[in-house]
Image (spheres, rainbow, N blue to C red):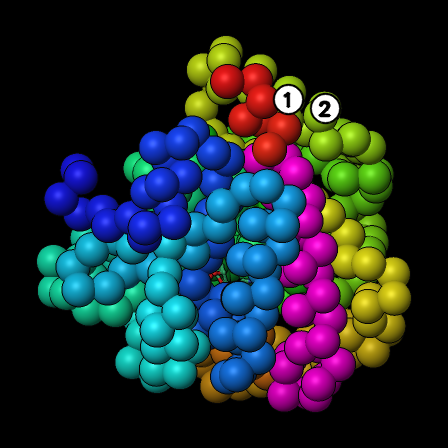
Amino acid sequence: MREYITLSEEVRIAQEQGKPIVALESTIISHGMPYPQNVQTAREVEQIIRDLGAVPATIAIVDGKIKIGLSDEELEMFGKSSDVAKASRRDLAYLLAAKKKGATTVAATMICAELAGIQVFVTGGIGGVHRGAETSMDISADLEELAQTNVAVVCAGAKSILDLGLTMEYLETKGVPVMGYQTEVLPAFYTRSSKFNVNFRVDDVETIASTLKTKWDLQIKGGAIIANPIPEEHAMDEAAISEVIEKALKEAEEQHISGKDVTPFLLAKVKELTGGKSLESNIALVKNNAVLGAKIAVSLHSFH
Ligand code: PSU
Ligand code: MN
């Protein structure tokens, strides 16, 4: 196992000293935001985590290794390169064996984090059940991963490019708890609310951490979602974002986009149609999630 994993110096020392570590994904850098904002955001998110007493570990596939913690040069490379594959569960083994570059999705980052003994992972939004999945069968591997891999995912909910109701049903079937941080309703990434409720409203970090500890103590396998609404001042107008998403979905259908290209296509369209506003929101919500994730990691760590 160890032969496939390379820890950065910072992460290696953190593990030796028994410090709390927070995993971060790389698809958000390579496929989620434009350069240079992607690299700048990645660095700022890492610093937020350090300032709160945890250690960041951005995860990616390079040179036949799972890198847990990226150097400045690697971050820059992932932010700039156009030849980085989107790496989900099914892609990991091949990308490692073929020594190709891979930016890990939520599913793949969870796998790698668990291998490295990291329990908390911060991102923007998760994949889910796509609209029309009853015929397309397009359901993100992120959901199945949440069902089986013991990593908590802090996110701002899921974008309404997905069917949020079906996504919640799927998570319920798989026994994945969705906790809302200081909210009863499932946030929808760019907006603070949706038509759906979370399973549990939790107002304090300690209860989130002790819920995770209890779940894993009981060996109830799988992760958990901690849904953290975007800060009010950065939220987008609900009607405006819905219109953009409808347009993006229509274009995806017209162009017969399928498979792993669906999510990146929709994300790129939404960005194109909203201009800078959605990028600004995206950056703000990831930073907000980093604050919460670092606090959860520190709290969870205090039980050890
Ligand atoms: N949703 C977002 N931003 C993202 C993604 C999803 O709002 O960057 C990325 C994440 O890496 C997620 C992946 O794990 O897309 C899901 O892709 P798919 O639907 O193909 O599983
Ligand atoms: Mn898909």
The image position of residue 94, as x and y in percent, is 17, 58
Residue ranking furthest to the top: 218
Left or right, residue 69 beside residue 173: left
**Residue 201 percent location from the top left of the image:** 80, 32
Mark yes or no: residue 168 visible. no
Query: Within the image, what quadrant is residue 273 found in?
Result: bottom right
Residue drawn at (50%, 74%) of the image: 39
Q: Is residue 251 left or right of residue 275?
A: left
> Image quarter for residue 169?
top right
Q: Where is residue 268 in the image (x, y as percent from the top left)?
A: 55, 81
The reply to whether the C-beta atoms of the residues labelled 1 and 2 are less than 8 Å apart is yes
Is residue 179 rendered magenta in the image?
A: no
Which of the labelled discs sits on residue 207, or is there none?
Answer: 2
Looking at the rendered structure, the secondary structure element under dot 1 is helix
Please state, as top left, top right, bottom left or bottom right, where the N terminus lies in the image: top left
**Residue drawn at (49%, 50%) of the image:** 56
Decide which of 118, 269 is in the foreground and name it: 118
Mark 2 is on which residue type? Thr
Label 2 crowd bin: few (<14), some (14–19), many (20+), radius 10 Å: some
Q: Mark 1 Cα within 10 Å, few/some/many (few <14, many 20+)?
A: some
Mark 1 is on which residue type? Thr
Q: In what element is the residue under mark 2? A: helix
Q: Quickly name the residue at label 1.
A: 211
Disc sitting over residue 276 in the figure? none
Q: Is residue 212 left or right of residue 82?
A: right
Q: Is mark 2 within 8 Å of ligand 1?
A: no
Q: Residue at horizontal 24%, vertical 64%?
A: 62
Magenta part, dominant SS: helix
Q: Can residue 63 be seen in this view?
A: yes
Q: For the magenta stretch, what is the residue range? A: 270-297
